[in-house]
Image (tube, rainbow, N blue to C red):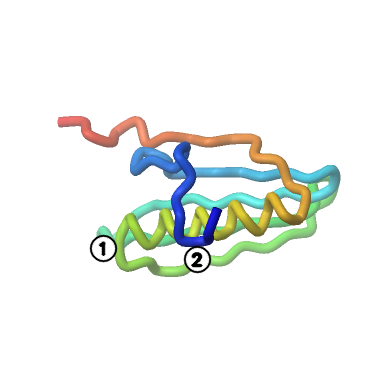
Amino acid sequence: MKANDLPPWLTPEITHVTWESETRHYGIRISPNLWGELELHKEWGGRFSRRGNSMVMPVLNAQQAQRLIAQENLRRVRRGYKMRVIAENVAHGAT
């Protein structure tokens, strides 16, 4: 799979993905900020310690956010992480 290809599990409803190795964790979630603009939140650290960090980056649209998640998935899998959690936006499509 190329970095630009989206995996079949990565649908527009997916808003949070978490990966874990034996000692580390990594998570990404997509959410709007106060002005309605999309942001990608990354968080990482040790599973058995308080060490870790986070980063927030603006994204232009949901498609860009999905491409970034797909690229991160490739990176995490190559480094031995296993996907643990996929959360869907329950309000997606609600009227």
Query: Looking at the picture, does residue 3 appear above or below residue 23?
Result: below
| Image position, residue 66 (x, y; %) | 42, 54
Out of 23 and 73, give the one closest to the viewer. Answer: 73
Foreground of the two, 88 or 7: 7
Indicate which disc residue 56 carries.
2
Nearest the viewer among 9 and 5 is 5
**Within-10-Å neighbours for mark 1: few <14, some 14–19, many 20+:** few
Write down the residue under mark 1: 35
Q: Residue at x 45, y 39 (%)?
A: 8
Indicate which label's residue lies in the foreground, 2 or 1: 2
Q: Residue 37: which quarter of the image?
A: bottom left
Spatial separation of the CA atoms under disc 2 and disc 1: 15 Å
Disc 1, SS: loop
Q: Label 2 sits on what residue type?
A: Val
Residue 55: percent from the left, percent from the top?
56, 66
Q: Amino acid at mark 1?
A: Trp
Question: In the rendered image, which quarter contains the C terminus?
Answer: top left
